[in-house]
């Protein structure tokens, strides 16, 4: 599909994916497709740690800031939009770097996605209302009954994915896990490199990143987002750490406690990301533990790809 070659850079949050991607994109003349389920929303630049304005000036980024916070964005929508970008880049013979930590987005591109039904806003409101009335964990318990396999994969804290799984079951009569196990639409041929960091190194980077976000005005960003009266159950407001920050802004807990909770949630999320990507076939891993220099990290990625015999697809065009 893409005449310039397609490579994905994946891994847990704070592993350095964006840093490596920008460096490699400049070297190879590539453009970046962001595979992040929260960076698609306009605003929340700090909260979702979007690429800087300078990075976006240097290297074209796609699928950033594409919808408003009140809209829903599915893996199917990501696939449709990403395929259109890949088609355009292929016509221009421009290499593509797919970069992000949302594993389902990368899988949707690579292996295809079942033809799931569109969302039903009324049904989604009904499900969210039930969770609010009957208490936290209600919908996850229901999902465990109708689709145990999906419930095992989806965290009880990820209400939006739980609602989507229940929505699919209600609309089709089939569990979401059964849909995903079926014969999906054709996938995209790509090479995938994962960034690995030892646990202590990754956790230090998570702590440092969140501290930086706080110093740069994270609480003010959330406050501004709430000002227009947005509902708190919107997908855009389900990013890591939003709920604790909202509680702090409303005086329900100290800000320091909210930040601590955000760090805890992010560490747990990073662990789930690693579990996901380790189960994906044909991912080659680059150990970037202790590295922070973009050139050094990029060199490690290229070396791993060369050793695996997968470097040809990502060489710069001449």
Image: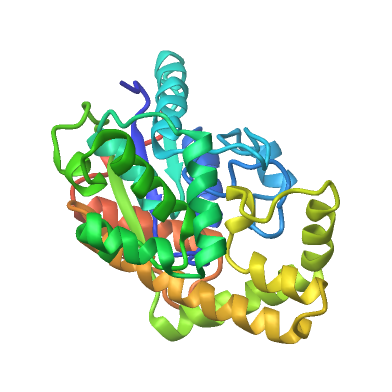
Front residue (pair 40, 254): 254
Could you tell me residue 142's position as x and y percent? 33, 61
Residue depicted at x 22% and y 27%: 185
Could you tell me residue 291's position as x and y percent? 49, 72
Residue 28 visible in the current orientation: yes
Q: Is residue 92 left or right of residue 230?
A: left
Residue depicted at x 69% and y 86%: 257
Quadrant hosting residue 209? bottom right
Depicted 228 relative to depicted 145: above or below: above
Q: Is residue 144 left or right of residue 259?
A: left
Q: Is residue 180 left or right of residue 298?
A: left
Could you tell me residue 232's position as x and y percent? 67, 56
Could you tell me residue 115's position as x and y percent? 28, 28
- Where is the N terminus found, in terms of image quarters? top left
Residue depicted at x 42% and y 13%: 91
Depicted 310 relative to depicted 5: above or below: below
Residue 95 visible in the current orientation: no
Residue depicted at x 47% and y 40%: 123
């Amino acid at each position: 599909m893409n005449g310039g070659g397609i490579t994905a850079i994946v891994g847990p949050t704070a592993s350095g994916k964006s840093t490596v991607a920008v460096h490699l994109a400049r070297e190879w003349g590539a453009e970046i497709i962001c595979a992040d389920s929260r960076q698609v929303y306009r605003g929340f630049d700090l909260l979702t740690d979007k690429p800087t304005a300078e990075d976006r000036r240097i290297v074209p980024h796609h699928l950033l800031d594409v919808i408003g916070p009140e809209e829903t964005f599915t893996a199917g929508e990501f696939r449709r939009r990403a395929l259109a970008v890949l088609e355009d880049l292929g016509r221009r013979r421009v290499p593509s770097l797919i970069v992000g930590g949302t594993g389902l987005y990368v899988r949707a591109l690579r292996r295809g996605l079942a033809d799931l039904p569109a969302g039903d806003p009324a049904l989604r409101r009904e499900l969210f209302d039930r969770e609010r009335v009957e208490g936290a964990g209600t919908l996850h318990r229901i999902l465990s009954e109708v689709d145990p396999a999906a419930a095992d994969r989806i965290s009880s804290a990820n209400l939006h994915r739980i609602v989507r799984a229940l929505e699919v079951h209600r609309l089709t009569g089939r569990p979401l896990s059964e849909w995903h196990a079926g014969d999906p639409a054709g996938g995209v041929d790509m090479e995938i490199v994962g960034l690995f960091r030892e646990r202590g190194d990754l956790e230090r980077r998570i702590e440092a990143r969140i501290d930086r976000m706080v110093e740069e005005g994270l609480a003010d960003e959330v406050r501004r987002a709430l000002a227009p009266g947005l509902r708190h159950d919107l997908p855009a407001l389900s990013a890591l750490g939003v709920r604790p920050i909202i509680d702090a802004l409303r005086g329900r807990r100290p800000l320091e406690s909210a930040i601590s909770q955000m760090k805890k949630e992010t560490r747990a999320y990073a662990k789930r990301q690693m579990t996901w990507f380790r189960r994906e076939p044909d991912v080659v891993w680059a150990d970037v533990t202790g590295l922070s220099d973009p050139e050094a990290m990029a060199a490690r990625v290229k070396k791993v790809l060369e050793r695996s015999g997968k470097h040809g697809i990502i060489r710069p065009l001449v």
